[in-house]
Amino acid sequence: MDFIPQMEPWFDECERLALNEYMLSGGWGTEFKKTREFERRIAEYTGAAFCSVTTNGTVSLVIALLACGVGVGDEVIVPDYTMVATPNAAELIGAKAVFVDIDRENLCMDFEKMRQAVTKKTRAVMLVTINGRCPKDMERFVAFCKEKNLRLIEDAAQSLGSACQGKHLGRFGDIGSFSFSAPKVITTGQGGALITDNEELFDKIKKIRDFGREGGGSDHYLCKGWNFKFTDFQAVVGIEQMKKLPWRIERKKEIGQLYEQCLRGTPGIELIPTDYEQTSPWFFDILAERREELQSYLQEKGIGTRKFYPPLHAEPAYGYDASFPVTEEIARKGLWLPSSSRLTDKEVEFVCEAVKSFYY
Ligand SMILES: *Cc1c(COP(=O)(O)O)cnc(C)c1O
């Protein structure tokens, strides 16, 4: 069997033909009709009223914060367990990322911990629906932020195709953010998207990403903005990827369930509860005893894995002397198994057998 990567982007002749056709059409490359179509498709798929795409999922978070009026000196609450882009987006605009611990059951921000971290300076909460899962009581986050006049930004970079109570993730916050970087569910090489139902926020987003302009081509600047625009090259790829998304989401759910069936009860391994009706796991995650050893063992068998993100507060970039026990524990044990939607059942079974042979 060939080496099984932990994740890989998946393009085929659809993207190749679509790009070829675009190149023959005389397009200028920068965002235009194809980008608007890509945005329309994302809005339709998620059920959001508005969508705006941008250069990547870090910049999309920056734009979301700016559109929400977050700025220098403001505090933004983020989970300690997330991809580093979440806190870094807040820090880029001069705000302070305030870390809180997560709920062990779903690895999302702990509501009580978040509530306790609010100060007079808090302006926004960045809720990360990590790996397509949502917190136990999503509505509590929404109601609390509303009551306290805080903006709720949902970092749904890992949640395209996943829902909570039947509603697509990214739609609970004032703004939801997605990423199309190479390892994500669908990719445009790099890319990000923002969705919202709030027309005023959408209007701000559009201006911030285009120099603050009144409208396309105008040199009248209504607010401070920059160039965070997309390209039609990427949109052409994104449209083809969107066509494949429904299949990929179903396939990832099947793969997750197959992993669960095969691995349940294996000593040394803990599975994180997953509701496959709602969640299409971006990566298949396990908590493993002797993780480092398991990882090298699998590598030798030709199986790629990846460790969970570290507790961000303790990374040199932040260096906070604090303790977030849940994040610390799961970051020590967490391992992502191969998770591409391209995996065959045979490959999943091969991975499971390898994991089991390590522990038995
Ligand atoms: C991937 C990711 C990002 C960053 O997206 P980029 O497109 O790589 O900038 C942000 N947050 C989360 C949770 C992610 O998984």
Image (tube, helix red, strand yellow):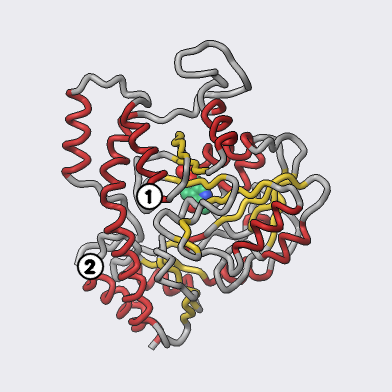
Tell me if residue 100 comes above or below residue 345 in the rendering. above
Q: Nearer the viewer, residue 205 or 231?
A: 205
Amino acid beneath label 2: Thr
Residue 239: image quadrant is: top left
| Image position, residue 294 (x, y; %) | 42, 74
Mark 1 residue element: helix
Outermost residue, right side:
120
Give the mark nearest the N terminus, 2 or 1: 1
Q: Nearer the viewer, residue 264 or 274?
A: 274
Q: Which residue is under mark 2?
A: 344
56 up-or-down from 168: above or below: above
Residue at 65 percent across and 53 percent down: it is 78
Q: Please indicate whether residue 84 sits to the left or right of residue 147 in the image.
A: left
How far is disc 2 from disc 1 in space, using C-alphas? Answer: 26 Å
Q: Secondary structure at mark 2?
A: loop
Q: Position of residue 11 (x, y in %)?
A: 24, 46
Give the residue drawn at x 53%, y 41%. 58
Mark 1 surroundings: few (<14), some (14-19) or many (≥20) residues within 10 A: some
Location of mark 1 (residue):
45
Q: Quadrant of the N terminus?
A: bottom left
Q: Residue at x 62, y 35 (%)?
A: 67
